[in-house]
Image (tube, rainbow, N blue to C red):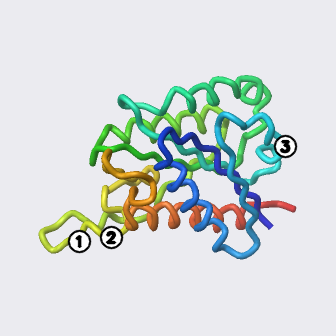
Amino acid sequence: MANVAIVYHSGFGHTAVQADSVATGARSVPGTTVTLIKAEEWEAHAEALDAADAIIFGAPTYMGSVSAQFKTFMDATGKIWYTQKWKDKLAAGFTNSASQSGDKLNSLIQLAIFGAQHGMIWVSLGELPQNNSSQSNPDTVNRLGSFLGAMAQSNNDQGPDLAPPPADRKTAEILGARVATLALRVAVR
C-alpha cells in the first residue's frame, strides 16, 4: 500500500482541476491511497503528510513563480524541514498558467528545490514532448514539453470547466500514476 498526498493552491480553479487529474492518475494505480490537500489547510492534514510515501506539490504560476499562498505553505514547513520529517519521501510537482510558457519552468524548479531542501527524492514527468514537429497535434500529452513536472496552460478567458484542456489533464494524470507506481516500489510497510 502506498500513500500519496497532493498539496496544492488554486487561485481561480484551474490548478484545482490539474490537482484532481493528478489524483485520478494516482488512484488508477491499485494499492494507492490519495489525499488531496489545499495548501492553506495543510496543518489540518499534517498526519496525512507525515504518513505519505510521496507528496506532489502543485501551484499556479503567478509572475514567474508559485503563488504567494503556496509560498506561505512552503515557508510554514520550516519545523518539518529542521527535523527532516519528509526526508526520503518521493516528491513531484505541477503548475498552471495562462500563457504557453508563462515561466512555468521556474515554478517547477522552485518546487523541486523545496523538495530537495526537505531531503525528498524528485520524480520527473517521464514523458517525451509530443507537440514539437510540423506533424504534431497540440491535443497530445506533454504538449508543453516539460520534463521536470506537469505543466498546464489555461486560457485566461475560460473557466476551470474548460481549461486546462484535456491534453494537460491527461499529462497530470500520467504524473500522478508515475508517482503512485514508484511510491508502491519504495513503500516499506
| Disc sitting over residue 47 in the figure | 3
- Foreground residue among 86 and 170: 170
Direction from residue 62 to residue 93 in the image, left or right: right
- Mark 3–mark 2 Cα distance, whole angstroms, equals 37 Å
Q: Say which amino acid is labelled 3.
A: Glu
Check disc 2 and report the residue beneath it.
140
Q: Nearer the viewer, residue 53 or 6?
A: 6
- Residue 131 found in image quarter: bottom left
Q: Is residue 27 above or below residue 70?
A: below
Mark 2 and 1 residues: CB-CB less than 8 Å, in contact?
Answer: yes
In the image, what residue type sits under mark 2? Thr
Question: Measuring 70% from the left and 48% from the top, which residue is drawn there?
Answer: 89
In the image, what residue occupies the spot 71% across and 23% down? 78
Q: Which amino acid does label 1 sit on?
A: Asn
Kind of element beneath mark 2:
loop
Q: Mark 1 points at which residue?
A: 137
Residue 54 appears in the rendering:
no
The mark nearer the N terminus, 3 or 2, is 3
Q: Using a 10 Å C-alpha cutoff, classify the residue at mark 2 as few (fewer than 14 neighbours), some (14 to 19) or many (20 or more).
A: some
**Mark 3 or mark 1: whose residue is earlier in sequence:** 3
- Residue 93, above or below 78: below
Secondary element at tag 3 = helix
The foreground one among 79 and 24 is 24
Is residue 160 visible in the rendered structure shown here?
yes
Location of residue 161 in the rendering, given as x and y in whole percent from the top left corner: 45, 59
CA–CA distance in space, label 3 to label 1: 43 Å
Q: Position of residue 129 (x, y in %)?
A: 31, 63
